[in-house]
């Protein structure tokens, strides 16, 4: 919290005291935990990895909500917790109206967007990248925190892989800031929007999100949303000139193909609503990018678009972007593996004795990965509909409740109806806000860390 504290001090805002108090609380809690916890066996196994990740994210969110409450800008702790979880999970769902957002202090606005940037690549991935105390035995932490069906190393040492990913992350963020400044966007605005784009979060600092900025800035943010939705391995292979491996990145090509086709279809569908093809294309590409990358920025209230366009965007909410990116959703790679698995099963029905293997990006996919992908999809659907049934007790229309769960569970932010681009989540009850906060955590950590932490069997000592 030193950075938002510094921002508050630069703008001479009283909210710097809120960050200072929380820094002292966090430091005291950390020192206390370090003093009382001295395990003999410091090896981190799979169980410990899941628990560390789940509890760390909950504690970070609980502490991260305090500056909002202490500053009085979000008096309700439940609302502040919802906002902070939405920030760290890069969801971008907010309980704040446009007027309240524009009235917030610079330090608090920076903190909202900075939570996106920290949570985008992963809170504990940052720890692995910046410290020497974590060894490759901590791969279970990264597996539990990094999104996607598989997680591998770019280089032999895990910590070096984390550093490479963060260097790419920082480089792209700085590049976007520079390009936005070139478009005459103010420095503060450029920084917070780049942080939100990099983390694919979507907290804006204006009531109309990105709509009041120039078409150039909208194009820059739209393109960078797509870029941050790509698998970061693509950038590593490009920098290392490993073009053969780059050519095998099928997930990236499918991701870009889906985005292109969706943008063209929506452009044609919404063309009567705008003055020309160029304007319709810009809004179409931006909204496809914001939904597929699960960012949540908006240039238009797509809640008012034709049913076909809204239907495409709803489907894209589930699809999401690439694995090993900062985006949410089911992930393109997982969808490809599901389709390939179904095709193999259909072939076995016709030729029971045939041996069929699934090939993905030039490599044979092992049975454990396929089983894990199928199981994840099944658990995903169960969790989704359980959360949806709980939220359905709210006195809102089905479109609002269904899209609210879809947007929170897939870490997108805005949905349709009352929670559309021009709405917010303030009208939901305390219970629903807590449930949706859990949904955001489930979506960002890909379900299993949270479920395993809640399971009593996880805490039992195994002999």
Image: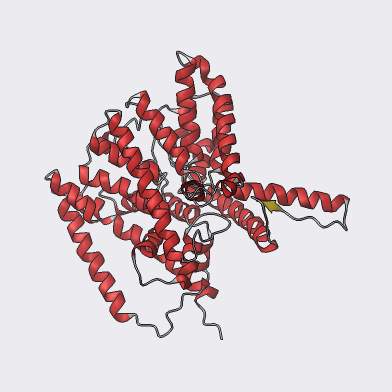
Which residue, as the protein is rendered here, is positioned at the far left? 12
271 relative to 130 in the view: left or right: right
- Count the marks: how many? 0
Instruction: Please tell me in which quadrant of the rendered image residue 367 appears.
Output: bottom right
**Percent from the top left, x then y, of residue 58?**
39, 61
Asked whether residue 95 appears in the rendered view, the answer is no
Residue at 32% x, 45% y is 113
56 relative to 406 in the view: left or right: left
- In the picture, which quadrant includes the N terminus? bottom left
- In the picture, which quadrant includes the C terminus? bottom right
Asked whether residue 460 appears in the rendered view, the answer is yes
Residue at 21% x, 54% y is 70
Residue at 58% x, 37% y is 315
Residue 189, above or below 40? above
**Percent from the top left, x then y, of residue 153?**
51, 61
Residue at 42% x, 46% y is 91
131 relative to 333 in the view: left or right: left
Question: Which colour style is shown?
Answer: secondary structure
Closer to us: 126 or 318: 126
Closer to us: 281 or 245: 245
**Percent from the top left, x then y, of residue 417?**
47, 33
**Percent from the top left, x then y, of residue 189?**
27, 36
Closer to us: 402 or 259: 259
Residue 184, above or below 457? above
């Amino acid at each position: 919290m030193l950075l938002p504290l510094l921002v508050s001090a630069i703008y001479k805002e009283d909210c710097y005291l809120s960050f200072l108090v929380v820094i002292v609380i966090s430091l005291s809690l950390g020192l206390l935990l370090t003093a009382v916890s001295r395990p003999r066996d410091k090896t981190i196994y799979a169980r410990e990895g899941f628990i560390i990740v789940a509890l760390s994210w909950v504690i970070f969110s609980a502490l991260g909500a305090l500056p909002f409450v202490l500053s009085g800008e979000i008096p309700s702790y439940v609302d502040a917790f919802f906002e902070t979880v939405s920030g760290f999970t890069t969801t971008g769902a907010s309980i704040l109206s446009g007027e309240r957002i524009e009235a917030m202090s610079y330090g608090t606005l920076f903190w909202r967007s900075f939570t996106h940037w920290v949570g985008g690549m992963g809170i504990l991935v940052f720890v692995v990248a910046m410290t020497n105390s974590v060894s490759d035995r901590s791969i279970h932490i990264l597996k539990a925190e990094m999104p996607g069906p598989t997680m591998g190393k770019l280089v032999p040492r895990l910590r070096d892989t984390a550093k490479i990913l963060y260097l790419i992350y920082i480089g792209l963020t700085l590049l976007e800031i520079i390009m936005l400044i070139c478009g005459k966007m103010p420095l503060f605005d450029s920084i917070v929007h780049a942080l939100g784009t990099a983390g694919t979060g979507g907290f804006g600092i204006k009531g109309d999100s990105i709509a009041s900025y120039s078409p150039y800035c909208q194009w820059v943010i739209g393109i960078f949303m797509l870029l941050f939705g790509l698998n970061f391995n693509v950038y590593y292979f490009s920098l290392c000139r490993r073009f053969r491996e780059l050519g095998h990145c099928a997930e990236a090509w499918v991701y870009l193909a889906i985005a292109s086709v969706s943008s063209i279809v929506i452009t044609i569908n919404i063309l009567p609503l705008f003055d020309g093809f160029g304007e319709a294309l810009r809004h179409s590409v931006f909204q496809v990018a914001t939904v597929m990358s699960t960012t949540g920025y908006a240039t238009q209230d797509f809640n008012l678009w034709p049913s076909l366009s809204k239907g495409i965007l709803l489907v894209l909410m589930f699809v999401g972007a690439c694995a090993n990116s900062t985006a949410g959703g089911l992930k393109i790679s997982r969808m490809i593996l599901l389709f390939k698995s179904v095709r193999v099963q259909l072939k076995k029905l016709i030729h029971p004795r045939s041996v069929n293997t699934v090939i993905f990006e030039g490599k044979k996919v092992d049975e454990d990965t396929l089983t894990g992908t199928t199981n994840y999809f099944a658990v995903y659907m169960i969790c989704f509909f359980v959360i949806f049934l709980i939220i359905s007790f709210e006195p809102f229309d089905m479109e609002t409740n269904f899209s609210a769960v879809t947007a929170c569970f897939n870490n997108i932010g805005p949905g349709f109806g009352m929670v559309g681009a021009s709405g917010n989540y303030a009208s939901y009850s305390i219970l629903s806000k807590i449930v949706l906060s859990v949904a955001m955590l489930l979506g960002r950590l890909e379900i299993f860390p949270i479920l395993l932490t809640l399971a009593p069997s996880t805490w039992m000592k195994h002999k």
